[in-house]
Image (tube, grey):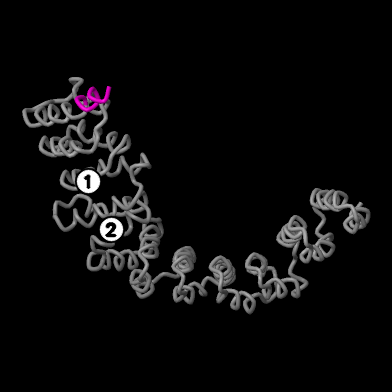
Amino acid sequence: MLSKEVTRLRDKDVRQRRKAVRRLFEDGDPSALPHFLPFLNDQDDWFVERAMIAIERWYDGRDEGIVQSLAKSEIPDRRLLAARVANRLGSPKGILGILAQDDDLKVRIAAWKGLMGLDPSESTLALESTDAAVRRIAVNSLFEAGLVDDRGLHAMMSDPASSVRAEVSRNMANKGIDASVKDAYEGYVETHMRVEEASKAIIESPLHALGLDWVQRYMASTSARDITALTKGFRNSSWMEDESVVDLVLELSSDQLLVRILRKGRGKLVEEVCLRAIHDPDRSSSSKSRIILDRIGRDPSPEFAESLSNGDLNLDDEIASSISLLTKEALGSDSGGH
């Protein structure tokens, strides 16, 4: 069967060649790989792509020339493939080391992954990469291999990229971390992790950031400086689009912070969060009133105003007055538009 399909790979009819390729993939015989390699130079991208798929599936590392040729290609996707399959070579470090300096970020990441997969101690060198994405992978590799000590932790937490420092924090939440490393981490957080770091972490990933103890401490702050910094983080993120994040914000925020991060914005999402805050029995009347008043001038919907007037709120004079003012704008402007 193999010889028949291999013969058809050279057929003048493109339909026959494609049929042969599909049949060889169905058979899954690695010995077919050499017959796919000429397609790397084919003018038809469909055949080029199938040749690269065949290499990734069937390459066994015995012909080093295949990887060397891919690694020297001017086409980034081929160098990326070389980085992915290089670990199948008997001695892959040389090629991976070259590809780790490639001009293309994806190639560099794949090569570093290969190096760290071969030897977790390579992760220490990866921490010196100029790519934050590579350094994040290195952090995970070091933690997984149990190679993090006090000194290494300090180096990782001193990284210029907040995404790398956040990766350290995520790993610290895992079980089995050495007590001395935990102590070093807590000490570093107390002395170095400022509110600006919390704000950056929120921008990058609100859900991840709000799971960190030190970010949660800032969330409960009533300091004007802390609130201003955190508000910037929330306003530059899409936190309202994730219900899990909304739950955490409502649970963790001080009244002052919640009022600030809800102050701007229009539309259904912000109104839904405002309603949850207004109906929260643990929130102060003054904060609820402020949230209501801040909707004035931001095109509050009639539905929002009506939901405040349906009688299920525990109203005091301050809240009632705020609802009255908002209702006049929302319902008045709505009726004026007809």
Q: Secondary structure at mark 1?
A: loop
Tell me residue 327's x, y (percent). Answer: 17, 27
Residue type for callout 2: Ala
Task: Using the image as rendered, state which of residue 68 and residue 318 is in the foreground.
Answer: 318
In this figure, which residue is indicated by the disc labeled 2? 198
> In this image, 231 relative to 150: left or right?
left
* Residue 332 magenta-highlighted: yes
Q: Residue at x 72, y 61 (%)?
A: 52
Residue holding disc 1? 253
- Tell me residue 46's x, y (percent): 75, 55
The quarter of the displayed image where residue 191 is located: bottom left
- The CA span between labels 1 and 2 is 13 Å
Horizontally, residue 68 falls left or right of residue 135, namely: right
Instruction: Tell me the element at label 2.
Output: helix
Q: Main secondary structure of the magenta part?
A: helix
* Sequence-wise first label, 1 or 2: 2
Disc tally is 2
View extreme (top): residue: 311
Q: Residues within 10 Å of mark 2 (few under 14, many from 20)?
A: many
In the foreground, 319 or 187: 319
Q: Is 136 included in the stretch rendered in magenta? A: no
Q: x and y percent of residue 248 in the render?
A: 30, 43
| Residue nearer the viewer, 225 or 42 | 42
- Look at the image and give the residue range highlighted in magenta: 331-338
| Rendered image: mark on residue 87 | none
